[in-house]
Amino acid sequence: MAALVGYHPVIEALRAKRPLDRILVAKGLGGPRVQEVIELARQTGTPVRFEDRSAIDRLSASKVHQGIAALGAATKYVELDAVAPNADLLVVLDGVEDPHNLGAIIRTAHAAGAGAVIVPERRAAGLTDVVEKAAAGALNHLPVARVVNINQALRSLHEMGYFVYGIDERGVEAHSSVKWPEKTVIVMGAEGAGLHELVKKNCDQLVRIPMAGKIASLNVSVAAGIVLFDWLGKRQPVTETD
């Protein structure tokens, strides 16, 4: 993950509209410089987080950071409205924090024919160089949209005609029996925690992946692969040839 530290490197990156995942500002720091950073970040849509100074110390190593740091992004995010109208399948990630999982899901989503992956602005992995490597080139082909509020995004997608499925171990129907509609949203939960309760309420249906073993859940990137290729297989059934 590329990090910029100090006021001048961060402000120049913002002025140049360089892709940034987020900006960190030490709690309690104020003044005109901080306000300039915040205003430019607002203009470019870059999230600003106020963190303990110790967190910025760890990022900067021995560099003088002046209480400000920025984490670079591997690529730019797109707006939800730019990808939602023309997609058959959208993949929404409810707080996936491991960059390797995010990259693997992006790679799988592209291979399965998804139109985009949608991630929340907070409490989730960003598009870092680690994600880019794990995605194995898929970031060059599959757009990633970042939204402020996952639940609002799901409600908007529902209004656009999408049917929203949440993958949850307590779902009544198995994914293998789902007849995926023409416009589908598949929502995957965070590592360990799964889907948030409010996210579940904004899904039209919860579906599960049947398990034969004693472990109740799968790694989120593995689970995504199972469900997404089920969708693809039903959209493009294999035909036998002589």
Image (tube, rainbow, N blue to C red):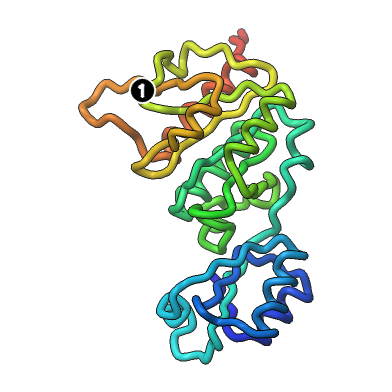
User: Viewer-proximal residue, 55 or 20?
Assistant: 55
Residue 129: % across, % down: 56, 63
User: Viewer-proximal residue, 26 or 9?
Assistant: 26
Residue 215: % across, % down: 24, 31
Q: Determine the residue positioned at 50% across, 27% down.
A: 201
171 horizontally vs 65: left or right: left
Quadrant assignment for the C terminus: top right
User: Viewer-proximal residue, 111 or 62?
Assistant: 62
Quadrant housing residue 157 = top right
Residue 160: % across, % down: 74, 26
Q: Which residue is mark 1?
A: 170
Amino acid type assigned to the residue bearing label 1 in the image: Arg
Mark 1: secondary structure: loop
Quadrant housing residue 58 = bottom left
Residue 70: % across, % down: 59, 73
Q: Determine the residue positioned at 35% across, 20% down.
A: 210
Q: Determine the residue positioned at 59% across, 79% down.
A: 4
Q: Is residue 5 above or below residue 96?
A: below
Q: Is residue 129 above or below residue 233?
A: below
118 horizontally vs 168: left or right: right
Q: Looking at the image, how many numbered discs can be counted on the residues? A: 1
Check the image and name the residue furthest to the left.
214
Q: Is residue 148 above or below residue 153?
A: below
Q: Determine the residue positioned at 68% across, 84% down.
A: 33
170 horizontally vs 184: left or right: left
Few, some or many residues within 10 Å of mark 1 (<14, 14–19, 20+): few
